Image: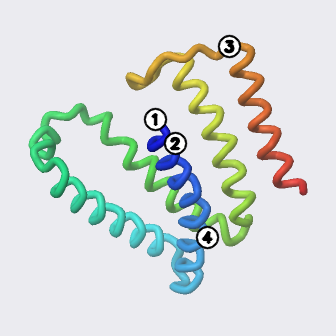
């Protein structure tokens, strides 16, 4: 379990770094959408290589996967393209602030209803209080 937490902490640290660096690439190129496409291409190649090394047999299942399970790729592209275009104008901190608030809302909703096969974790008063406390902390970091 600690390995999961450390891995997700590292992933979380990477999100603002990704946003700032990709926004800088977009400014350098004068084309934020191209920077987003490059990021997604490098990510695709990296994920494909890791898949080929760790579990290539899973690729054959792709043809029979339900098509709606491919939609997260659109969400990823939306995130990458929007953060790349908006962060330089709105600020990385402000952009990530709204991303975090959105993540808290959607994560609580997904868990509460057990959507997409997620573990069902009801939204109890203590959990809601914790989420509101986290949201308050995110807001306070932007006002400081």
117 displayed left or right of 106: left
Q: Can you identify the residue that label 2 sits on?
A: 5
46 sits left or right of 125 in the view: left
Residue drawn at x 54%, y 65% as measured from the top left: 18
Mark 3 residue element:
loop
**Residues at marks 4 and 2 touching, judged by CB atoms closer than 8 Å:** no
Label 4 or label 1, whichever lies nearer to me, is 1
Q: CA distance from mark 3 to mark 4?
A: 36 Å
**Residue at 89%, 54% in the rendered image:** 143
**In the figure, 118 relative to 94: above or below?**
above
Query: What whole-number distance in Å separates the C-alpha atoms at marks 1 and 3?
Result: 23 Å
10 Å neighbourhood of mark 2: few (<14), some, or many (≥20)? few
Judging from the image, what secondary structure is the residue with disc 4 in?
helix
Q: Secondary structure at mark 1?
A: loop
Q: CA distance from mark 1 to mark 2?
A: 7 Å
Q: Residue furthest front?
A: 2
Residue on which disc 4 sits: 20
């Amino acid at each position: 379990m600690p390995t999961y937490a450390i891995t997700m902490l590292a992933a979380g640290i990477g999100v603002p770094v990704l946003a700032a660096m990709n926004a800088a690439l977009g400014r350098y190129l004068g084309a934020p959408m191209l920077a987003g496409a490059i990021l997604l291409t490098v990510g695709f190649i990296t994920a494909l290589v890791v898949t080929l090394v760790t579990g290539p047999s899973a690729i054959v299942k792709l043809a029979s996967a339900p098509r709606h399970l491919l939609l997260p790729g659109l969400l990823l592209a939306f995130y990458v393209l929007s953060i790349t275009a908006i962060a330089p104008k709105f600020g990385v901190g402000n952009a990530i602030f709204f991303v975090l608030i959105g993540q808290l809302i959607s994560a609580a909703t997904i868990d509460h209803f057990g959507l997409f096969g997620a573990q069902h974790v009801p939204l109890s008063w203590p959990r809601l209080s914790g989420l509101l406390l986290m949201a308050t902390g995110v807001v306070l970091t932007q006002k400081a």
